[in-house]
C-alpha cells in the first residue's frame, strides 16, 4: 500500500514539473471597457500578444488562422445566479496571400451567438504588423441591447479571446497538442457603464 502511494506521488511530481503543465497564457487583456449608448451595449478592448515564430511560419506557408471573440452580457442578481442576457461571437480570419504578398483579415459573426449572423468585413494590409493591429483592437463592438425596463439593473460583460485551433487543418491540430506556442487566449470582465458615468 505504501509503495502504491509513493508511486502516485512520484507521478504527480513528474506531471507538475513538466513544461507543458505550466504553460503561460500567450495573450493579455490590456484594456476592457463596456459602455451603454442608448439601448446598445458596446465593448472596446485591447489585447496584447505576439505571434510565436512557429505560428507566423505556418501563416507564411498559407495556413489561415482563426481568432474567436466571445462576449456574454450578464445581469447581476444578488439572490440567484447572474442572468445571461445575450451572447455574441465574432470570428477573425487572418491569411497571407502569396501572389499579392498582402495580408487579409476577414471578420464575420460566428455561428452559435445570439447576435445577427452574416455580417462580413474584409480588409487587406501590406504588413503582418498592420493586420495584427486590427485583430488586437476591438472598438465599440455591439454585444447586446437593453430595453427601457432593464435600465435600473447592474450589468457586466464577460469577454473572451482565443486562437481557434479547431479551425486549423487536421495535421496542424494534431501537431499543436501540448505546444504552448499555439495557446493564445485571454479573458476578462467589465461592468457596463451608463452614459451618465462617462
Image (tube, rainbow, N blue to C red):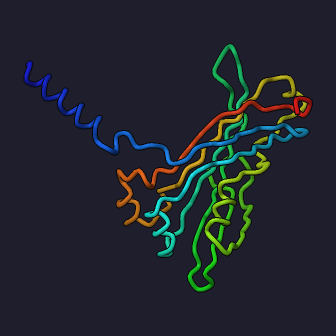
Relative to 67, say whether 14 is above or below. above
Residue at x-position 67% and y-position 75%:
126
40 with respect to 56 (left or right): right
Q: Position of residue 189 (x, y in %)?
A: 66, 34
Residue at x-position 69% and y-position 15%:
78
Q: Quadrant of residue 153?
A: top right
Q: Position of residue 81 (x, y in %)?
A: 63, 21
Q: Quadrant of the C terminus?
A: top right
Residue at x-position 28% and y-position 37%:
17
Relative to 54, say whether 44 is above or below. above
46 with respect to 61 (left or right): right
Q: Position of residue 135 (x, y in %)?
A: 65, 58
Q: Position of residue 181 (x, y in %)?
A: 43, 54
Relative to 124, say whether 138 is above or below. above
Q: Quadrant of the N terminus?
A: top left
5 with respect to 183 (left or right): left
Front-lying residue, 14 or 8: 14
Q: Quadrant of residue 32?
A: top right
Front-lying residue, 93 or 113: 93
Front-lying residue, 113 or 103: 103
Residue at x-position 65% and y-position 36%:
158
Amino acid at each position: 500500500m505504501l509503495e502504491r502511494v509513493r508511486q502516485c506521488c512520484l507521478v504527480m511530481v513528474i506531471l507538475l514539473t513538466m513544461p507543458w503543465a505550466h504553460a503561460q497564457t500567450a495573450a493579455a487583456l490590456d484594456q476592457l471597457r463596456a459602455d451603454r449608448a442608448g439601448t446598445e451595449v458596446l465593448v472596446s478592448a485591447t489585447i496584447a500578444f505576439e505571434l510565436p515564430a512557429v505560428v507566423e511560419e505556418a501563416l507564411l506557408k498559407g495556413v489561415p488562422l482563426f481568432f474567436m471573440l466571445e462576449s456574454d452580457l450578464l445581469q447581476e442578481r444578488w439572490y440567484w445566479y447572474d442572468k445571461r442576457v445575450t451572447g455574441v461571437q465574432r470570428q477573425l480570419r487572418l491569411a497571407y496571400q502569396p501572389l499579392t504578398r498582402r495580408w487579409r483579415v476577414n471578420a464575420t459573426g460566428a455561428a452559435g451567438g445570439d447576435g445577427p449572423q452574416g455580417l462580413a468585413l474584409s480588409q487587406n494590409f501590406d504588413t503582418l504588423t498592420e493586420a495584427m493591429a486590427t485583430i488586437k483592437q476591438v472598438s465599440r463592438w455591439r454585444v447586446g441591447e437593453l430595453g427601457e425596463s432593464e435600465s435600473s439593473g447592474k450589468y457586466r460583460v464577460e469577454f473572451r479571446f482565443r486562437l481557434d485551433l479547431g479551425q486549423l487543418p487536421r495535421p496542424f491540430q494534431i501537431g499543436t497538442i501540448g505546444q504552448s506556442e499555439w495557446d493564445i487566449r485571454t479573458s476578462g470582465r467589465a461592468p457596463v457603464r451608463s452614459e451618465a458615468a462617462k
